[in-house]
Amino acid sequence: MRFSVNIPNFGDFADPRAVAKVAAAAEEAGWDGLFVWDHVLHRRHPRDFGDPWMLLTAAALATSRIRLGTLVTPVARRRPQQLARQVATLDVLSGGRVIFAAGLGGPVEDEYGSFGEPVDPVVLAERLDEGLGLLCRYWSGEPVDHDGRHFQARDVTLLPATVQRPRPPVWIGGFWPNRPPMRRAARWDGAVPLFASARHGHAPPVEEVRELVSYVREHREGHGAFELVLGGASPAEPAAARDLLAPLAEAGATWWDERQIQGGEGLDRLEAVLRRVELGPPAL
């Protein structure tokens, strides 16, 4: 199991310098990755927001080893050509350390409806799937012609290509027990599920993890590596952390994403996050 730190892109972490501090501390303390949220507007959190790709650029410049990415980017509210440029630029800058995680995002009424974008989940799912396929073609550095339902491209080549070949790993987020997002994840390189039974910051029930893993395996077509990313706030006491995480690893989790409790005072506060990061990842 590998271990990452998860922070929102608002509050203290709207400042790239704060994100760089967390990234450097995480690398020094032995964490394997840093992931930031990708929101432009969240009415529950009326605070300063930072652009996630600029925040991750600061993190890349402050580190040399840890993996970097968003959890998750709503492809449906992005222009694929611009997003492809951002991801490829960060992959080059970081020396091939980007992980690209995608989903529908939300809250839909806030982040789509507020700007006159479609809010129909069927349309958003179509845009997500079409956009993911187009992103991979853009990242190749080869000429692209595309005439899709939602996006078009006419003889365009986006350079530089990503350092990682044929592309960065693609993880898919979604709520379990909803089946469509996990069927989508099975077509890519990993799943970042949220659970209806576990709020952000709380570990999911092991039995539900086993059910999800079984479902993904049923729909998995490839035989390459597949990551399952679970997250929450792990106990500070080492034995308690092992008791929590070991069953999840046995059930199939390959990453533990350390998160603050949503609604807690430390969610978007640098001091609280640094305190946890500097203790280092749980030991199994």
Image (tube, grey):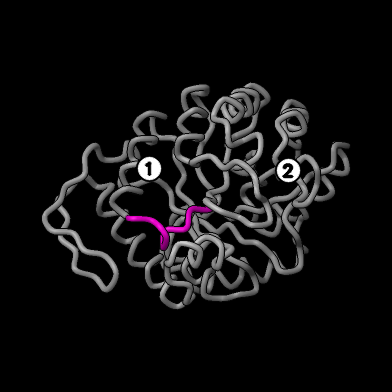
Label of residue 267 in the image: 2
Mark 2, Cα crowd under 10 Å, few <14 / some 14-19 / many 20+, is many
Q: Position of residue 57 (x, y in %)?
A: 45, 31
Q: Which residue is mark 1?
A: 87
Q: Is residue 233 above or below residue 236?
A: below
Residue at 25 percent of width and 50 percent of height: 138
Q: CA distance from mark 2 to mark 1?
A: 26 Å
In the structure shown, which secondary structural element does the residue marked by tag 1 occupy? helix
Q: Amino acid at mark 2?
A: Leu
Left or right, 111 with reference to 22:
left
Q: Position of residue 239 (x, y in %)?
A: 88, 40
Residue at 68 percent of width and 24 percent of height: 29
Left or right, 137 with reference to 264:
left
Examine the image and state in which quarter residue 241 appears: top right
* Residue at the extreme left of the image, as rendered: 155
Label of residue 229 in the image: none
Residue at 75 percent of width and 37 percent of height: 282
Looking at the rendered image, the quarter that the N terminus falls into is: top right
* Stretch of the chain drawn in magenta: 72-79
Q: Is residue 74 magenta?
A: yes
Looking at the rendered image, the quarter that the C terminus falls into is: top right
Mark 1, Cα crowd under 10 Å, few <14 / some 14-19 / many 20+, is many
The reply to whether residue 20 is visible in this rendering is yes
Left or right, 40 with reference to 260:
left
Q: Amino acid at mark 1?
A: Val
N-terminal label among 2 and 1 = 1
Q: Are marks 2 and 1 in contact (CB under 8 Å)?
A: no
Q: Position of residue 111 (x, y in %)?
A: 52, 60
Q: Is residue 98 magenta?
A: no
